[in-house]
Each structure stands twice: as C-alpha cells, then as structure tokens.
Image (cartoon, grey):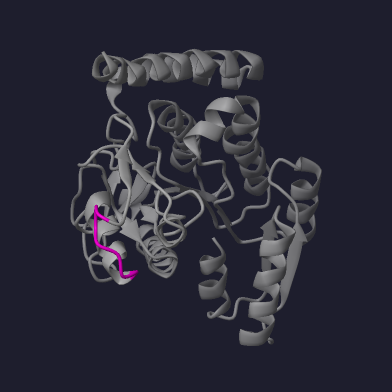
C-alpha cells in the first residue's frame, strides 16, 4: 500500500493521510515522501483500523474525500489461528469505518483485497465484499459515497506473498516448499500493482457498469512457481534442483483467480494487465454459509461468526490432510 502512497503523492493531493500500525514502515515512508514530495501536506498516523476511536476522530477532523483501505490480515495460517482478530480487522472494522465515511458524503471508499488462496480466507473476503457491494448499490444523490472492491493480483516479494523469502532462502541454502509442481500465481511488482489499482479506480468511476461489482485485476499470464525458482537459482549462480532444495507439501493448488465475466471494460491498463468485473468471489457452494454469516453480522453476533469460521477451517484442514495421508501410506 505504500507504493500507492508514492503514486498518489505524485499527483500532489491537497492533503494525504497515511495510516499504518507499523512504526518502522511509517517512518520509512515519511523519509521517502519528505525527500520526493516536500510540498505535499502529509500526516502520518500510527494506528490500526481496529482502533475505532482514532478512525472516527480522523474522519471527523479531516473529512477525507477518497479512502483506500488495504491494511488487512492476509496470511491463511495466521487467519485460521487468530480468527477473532481476523474478523475484527478484515470485516467489522472496515464496515465500521465505511459507515462513518458514508456520513461525511465522501466520494469514494476503496477496499483492496489480497489473494484469498483458501476456502476460509475466500469466505471472509466475500463476506465483507458483499457488504461493500450492497452499500455501493444503495448509493443515491443524498448518500453519494461509492464503495469499490478491488481484487488484486499477488504482489511479488510482498510479505504476504509466497515469493517473499525465496531469494534469502536460496542464498542461505535453505529448502523451499511449494504446494505442488503445478502451483502458480499472477505476480506483479508493487509498483505495477499500485499503478494498476489507481488506473482501475479512474476507469471504474467513469462508468456505472462497476456499481455493486468487484473489480478483478489480472497480471496477464500466470507464473509457475517452479519455473520462477529455477530462474532465480540461475540468477544466484546455482544449478536448479541440484544446488537448490525444493519440496512439495502436497496441498491442493490455491484457486488464485475467481471466475469473472468481462465486457468492454476488459482492456489493457498497463502492459500485460487486464481488468474485469464479477459480482462474486467464490463458488456458489458457499452461498448458504454466506447467508448465515451475513445474518450473524447484521445482528452483531461476532462470536457466532468466529464459531462458524472455525468449523470451516477445521473442515478445510481435514480435506487438505487426506491426500497427504494417502501418500504417506
């Protein structure tokens, strides 16, 4: 998301407010923006979206016109083991902020989704996305705020990417684990992702066809992890699969790209990048679960949301374990 801040600062906004729970990341961003864009008025707020009092105060004081939210829990294992925090950070807090923004008549609230490689993370993503889609559909002249959902591709070497530590692992001679020989992803650099998201926003706001839809950004052709490891090995002076240790976990290949219907919106945004729209992020087999979760959400029954998600997580673990048990036998 800091790449987005760099790009936005380059347009010299009247006022840029950057919120991050990491002091290190925020300080590094401040140093860079102070050097590159000293004339841009920037505020740097050390906080998380779960800090509702701080979020409410910022909205009340600054009345921001455009809000971009991407500070979310994304690692599947951490989400499964910290479901209460995941629900608070990925569902409840964005919706709380959205309601506050709606009262200020801001122009646009953007929810940027990371990849949802498991059924559990996909259901969480879809639950909050559907609420944003409903709010976007309900936009009127009296309540003009648009609510846009963007499903972004995997960002190369981002901390929540499978590629994050490959170079370091290769250098130290450590074993690299991949889901399977056929595992793949749509990979972008942080700069490509930021630029494409901003271009998608402009495109989306120029047409009513995006109302109530999810924007899906795809990085052209998928990249196979095994081929990337081989290329990185050569760049580091190693012989692939001789000097480099690779093992396969046996887990199913993540569904990294939801099916989506594209129309005349589908066009090249940056080299190799395309955009399409969809009104869903997961298969219809989870519609019944989404109805239950939505009911719990509307009644404020957080404990029931967490309990149902725990059941889904346990079912998913059992499914993933079956092929491993067969191989071991």
Q: Residue at x 31, y 46 (%)?
A: 246
Q: Position of residue 66 (x, y in %)?
A: 58, 60
| Residue closer to the observer: 112 or 155 | 155
Q: Position of residue 98 (x, y in %)?
A: 61, 43
Magenta span includes 166: no
67 on left or right of 154 = right
| Residue closer to the observer: 226 or 104 | 226
Residue 290 falls in which quadrant of the image? top left
Can residue 219 be seen here? The reply is no
Can residue 235 be seen here? The reply is yes
Query: The C terminus appears in which quarter of the rendering?
Result: top left
* Residue at the far front in the pictured view: 242
Magenta stretch secondary structure, dominant: loop
- 260 over 30 or under it: above or below: above
Q: Residue at x 68, y 56 (%)?
A: 20
Q: Position of residue 119 (x, y in %)?
A: 38, 27
| Residue closer to the observer: 221 or 49 | 221
Q: Residue at x 57, y 69 (%)?
A: 5
Q: Which residues are magenta?
A: 236-242
Query: The N terminus appears in which quarter of the rendering?
Result: bottom right
Q: Position of residue 302 (x, y in %)?
A: 64, 19
């Amino acid at each position: 998301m800091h790449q987005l801040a760099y790009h936005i600062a380059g347009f010299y906004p009247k006022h840029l407010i950057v919120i991050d729970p990491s002091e290190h990341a925020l300080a590094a961003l401040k140093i860079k923006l102070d050097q590159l864009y000293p004339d841009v008025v920037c505020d740097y707020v050390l906080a998380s979206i779960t800090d509702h009092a701080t979020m409410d105060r910022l909205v009340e004081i600054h009345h921001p016109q455009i809000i971009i939210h991407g500070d979310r829990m994304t690692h599947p294992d951490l989400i499964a083991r910290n479901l209460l925090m995941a629900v608070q950070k990925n569902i409840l807090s964005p919706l709380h902020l959205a309601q506050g923004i709606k009262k200020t008549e801001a122009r646009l609230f953007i929810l940027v989704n990371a990849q949802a490689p498991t059924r559990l993370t996909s259901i969480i993503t879809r639950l909050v996305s559907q609420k944003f889609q409903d709010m976007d559909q309900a936009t009127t002249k009296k309540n003009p705020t648009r609510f846009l959902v963007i499903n972004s591709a995997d960002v190369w070497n981002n901390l929540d990417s499978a590629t994050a530590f490959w170079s370091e692992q290769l250098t130290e001679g450590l074993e690299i684990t991949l889901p399977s020989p056929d595992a793949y992803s749509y990979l972008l650099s942080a700069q490509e992702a930021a630029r494409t998201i901003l271009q998608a926003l402009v495109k989306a706001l120029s047409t009513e066809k995006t109302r109530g839809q999810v924007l899906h950004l795809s990085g052209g052709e998928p990249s196979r992890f095994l081929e990337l490891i081989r290329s990185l090995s050569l760049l580091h002076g190693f012989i692939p699969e001789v000097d480099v240790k690779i093992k396969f976990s046996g887990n199913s290949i993540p569904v990294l790209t939801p099916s989506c219907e594209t129309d005349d919106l589908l066009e090249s945004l940056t080299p190799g990048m395309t955009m399409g729209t969809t009104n869903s992020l997961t298969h219809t087999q989870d519609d019944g679960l989404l109805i239950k979760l939505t009911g719990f959400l509307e009644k404020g029954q957080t404990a029931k949301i967490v309990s149902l998600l725990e059941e889904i997580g346990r079912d998913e673990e059992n499914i993933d374990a079956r092929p491993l048990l067969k191989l071991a036998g």
